[in-house]
Amino acid sequence: MSKNRTNLKRRELLKLGGKVATVGAVAGLSQLFVGCGDNQLQAPTSSGNAFDEETGNNSGDYSEIGTTYDGWAAGTTELISVDYPDDSIFEQSNSCSLAVTQQTTLGPCYFADSTGEDISLGLSGLPMQLCLRLVDSNCNPLTGYKIEIWHSDIRGVYSGDTSESSDASSFAGNFCTGGDSAAENSTWYRGLLSTDSNGRVNFKTHFPGWYSGRTIHIHFAVVDSYNNRQLISQLCFTDDFADYICTNHGLYSGRGVQDTPLARDNVFPSDYEDFVLSTEQNEDGTLLAYHTIKLV
């Protein structure tokens, strides 16, 4: 692991799922949001829909730099100051035996987009490093495959500008964007990267929001060198971690906790453990989420 990352445990009553490590303060972030008592962020306005359509930013009245009361970053991905962790993260907790191998649905909100590493396009939320490793059935890294990801913004809304997409045949329009004009004119939270010699891709994004009927999730697809999809699936977070962020992080708390826990989600199987991302809090207050994907 990078020495810029901490693995200190929080108090035992906050076991947030995966491997969550937190710190009480974040170095280098000088501006704190003030609201609701202590140094906690205020809840988003407009029923949790804190989006500025003129600037195309969902940070609402928040400044670009800040932390929640317990040290989680809040703002753009520019707050990510730590390096990506080394490959040792994938050697912990039997990551290969817990790798995602099962297909799930493509979903109605997919369209192709070639945005690279930073898929946030300047929006705000809990900044997240998403690190994925692709391996074969013997857990050897697979190089030169493309991994696509897509997910909603912090309000549970998908972007919908398909004007430059090479494949938007399955995109369900208003079902995904909710008729939101900013969403309809953006391609936020969609991207594609090729795996390196270690089978690795690293994205910068934000922790997604939820929408009714689904647990918080991230879609992904693995595409080979012939542009054939080899695996279409989804990743998720533990209920405890998702509920904690949706309760305590001011850019999410205005909407409350998700209405569909993993056990009631109709996409993930009942044995959903293989789909759950491991998570840690970085030293700068941002989120690290990581997982191994296995082609069998």
Image (cartoon, rainbow, N blue to C red):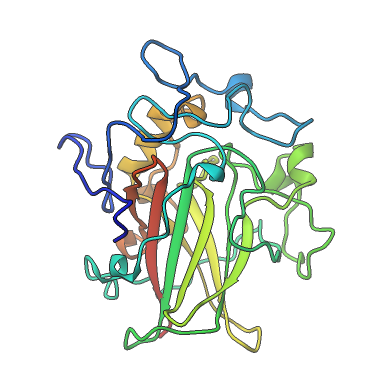
Identify the residue at image location x=63%, y=63%.
Answer: 116
Q: Residue furthest right?
A: 163
Q: As drawn, is 202 to the left or to the right of 69?
A: right
In the rendered image, the residue lying farthest to the top is 37
Q: Residue at x 33, y 42 (%)?
A: 241
Residue 235 or residue 206, whichever sits in front: 206
Q: Position of residue 237 (x, y in %)?
A: 38, 51
Residue in the image at 59% along x and 43% along y: 153
Percent position of residue 207, x then y: 48, 45
Q: Is residue 99 above or below residue 177?
A: below
Task: Find residue 159 and report its horizontal and vertical position in percent.
Answer: 70, 49
Judge from the rendering whether residue 41 lies leftward or rightward of residue 8; answer left or right: right
- Residue 180 falls left or right of residue 237: right
Residue 16: which quarter of the image? top left
Q: Quadrant of the C terminus?
A: bottom left
Residue 271: x %, y % from top left? 30, 62
Closer to the camera in the image, 201 or 211: 201
Image quadrant for the N terminus? bottom left
Residue 231 vertical placement versus 130 (above, below): below
Above or below, comparing residue 162 to residue 224 in the picture: above
Q: Nearer the viewer, residue 204 or 180?
A: 204
Count of marks placed on residues: 0
Residue occupying the far left of the picture: 12
